[in-house]
Amino acid sequence: MSFPPVKRLLSLLPVSRPVSRAQLSREMGCDEQTITDHVRQLQALGVNIEENPDGGLVLQEAIELLDTPSILSAMDTRMRGVLKNIKILETLDSTSSALQRMPEQDRHGAAVFAEHQSSGRGRRGRRWVSPFARNIYLSLGWQFQNQLAELGCLPLVVALAVSRALARAGLEGHRVKWPNDLLLNGRKLSGCLVDLQSDNRGPCQAVIGVGINVRMPESELTGEIDQAWTDLASHLPGLSRNRLAGLLLEALFHDLAVFAEHGFEPFRPYWRQMDGLFGRQVSALIKNELTVGTAAGIDENGALLLDTGNKTLRLHSGEVSLHKTSL
Ligand code: BTN
């Protein structure tokens, strides 16, 4: 699919009064069959385009596509300078895979956004459901001069950056769930996938993937998500995805620079403030055994402290779920 014509077609499709293929083909300077082909491509990606019995075309809801000038205008000038390269692709397998395919020397400060991912990757081998033009799918490349051992808290730092971007967008009441989910009313709003590579001496190359549910209606696709989820539109109707994308880049640039220089210590007060697990009963799979305990914050290395009653365990990786009685 070639993106510029499809983008143009989307901008010409009205939300209320249907428009004819003949008019669209005049405005786009192509034949009607090409319009039909573009419409089919968009419908296959899940865009709701209705066709009237008389052939008129109408969008069922307004669509805001991502575009570079709008994303940049949500960022302050200094932060724009950190962005070395920005790509917005209509559809690809995964923004993180795309970034990993770029030469290593081009990745630092490079941001890849997509409108749709056919193989969006979640943590622990899960699929990240990625419908067209509804959410944020971003991968950012970052090079740290630090050694790998100093970067264990990076996933938590990324979650806090997402949390700050959401707060700047006007959201209230969201919480972080160790290690790097964002929850709203106990439902997942955003997830991060951090991939770090190094030869142990530094520098380290990070590919930071962030998915935020912005406007995600129930569908066949969402039926396969195996955890409770929510989206921003239910809480912040009218939020611009472009603005959110700009705020997200800005928060990531700021926090990654602070983390590289000062480590996790400056982030601990904000983690405590946003910790959605603290004091809650949680279950964790540890060495294939389900362990239940009370979440008691994190240690200086970002490990989750789990108070089982007779001892405090430290979880360095893995996933926990809120125990049913604690929901
Ligand atoms: C999770 O399981 O919580 C992590 C989800 C991470 C999804 C994002 S979307 C952008 C980037 N590209 C991917 O394929 N995955 C991440």
Image (tube, rainbow, N blue to C red):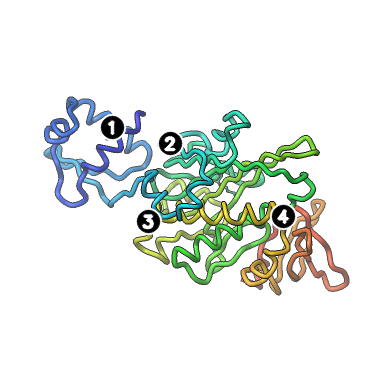
The tag on residue 89 is 2
Question: How far apart are labels 2 and 3 at the CA level?
Answer: 18 Å
Sequence-first disc among 2 and 3:
2
The x and y percentages for residue 218 are 42, 54
Mark 3 burial class by Cα count in 10 Å: few <14, some 14-19, many 20+: some
Sequence-first disc among 1 and 3:
1
Sequence-first disc among 4 and 1:
1
Residue behind mark 3 = 240
The x and y percentages for residue 31 are 17, 25
Question: How far apart are labels 1 and 2 at the CA level?
Answer: 13 Å
Q: Amino acid at mark 2?
A: Leu
Query: Can residue 214 be seen by looking at this rendering?
Result: no
Residue behind mark 1 = 5
Question: How far apart are labels 4 and 2 at the CA level?
Answer: 30 Å
The tag on residue 29 is none
Secondary structure at numbered mark 2? strand
Mark 4 burial class by Cα count in 10 Å: few <14, some 14-19, many 20+: many
Q: Amino acid at mark 4?
A: Cys
The tag on residue 153 is 4
Q: Quadrant of the N terminus?
A: top left
Sequence-first disc among 1 and 2:
1
Is 285 situated left or right of 129 in this image?
right
